[in-house]
Image (cartoon, rainbow, N blue to C red):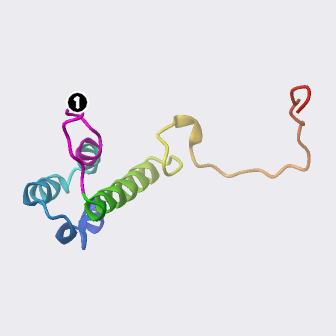
Amino acid sequence: MNPSVDILEGRLDQIPYAHIRARLVELKDNPQALLEYVDGLLLDTRDGQRRGFDVNTASVLLSIKLDLTTRLRSDIGAWPGTSEPEFIIANAKPTDSYAPAPLPKKW
């Protein structure tokens, strides 16, 4: 199953820009490229010349980004929302003790 198909379903009609919808559909089979495209849309890459999106379009793009990021990270076994290799999902072992962290004076 292609994970990006579900991500776009029901969202494309909420984006009023035909060229953006077309590009999202074009990239739907490449989740990493789709994520990079959405990131590029959300960032100001035009030296302050970009006017930005209306709230609804920005919200849809952010939700696509969140879903893509979560799915891509879960595919590689990383904790959703991070690309840090230290945060790999693993079984946790509970412990009954911990070492208290020293606090600065006058805390």
Left or right: 75 as drawn, with respect to 7: right
Q: Residue at x 22, y 50 (%)?
A: 30
Placement of 23 over or under 98, stated as above or below:
below
User: Dot 1, how many residues are within 10 Å of its Cα: few (below 14), some (14-19), or many (20+)?
Assistant: few
Q: Which residues are magenta?
A: 37-53
Secondary structure of the residue carrying numbered label 1: loop
Q: Residue at x 21, y 69 (%)?
A: 14
Q: Residue at x 85, y 49 (%)?
A: 95
Left or right: 70 as drawn, with respect to 54: right
Snapshot quadrant of residue 39? top left
Q: Quadrant of the C terminus?
A: top right
| Residue 94 position in % (x across, y down) | 81, 52
Hey, what amino acid is under mark 1? Asp
Looking at this rendering, what residue extends furthest in the top direction? 105
Main SS class of the magenta portion in the image = loop
> In terms of depth relative to the viewer, which is nearer, 19 or 82?
19
Q: Quadrant of the N terminus?
A: bottom left
Q: Residue at x 40, y 56 (%)?
A: 66
Snapshot quadrant of residue 56? bottom left
| Residue 5 position in % (x across, y down) | 24, 65
> In terms of depth relative to the viewer, which is nearer, 101 or 49?
49
| Residue 53 position in % (x across, y down) | 24, 54
Placement of 38 over or under 46, stated as above or below:
below
Q: Which residue is mark 1?
A: 47
Numbered marks: total: 1
| Residue 79 position in % (x across, y down) | 54, 49
Q: Is residue 41 magenta?
A: yes
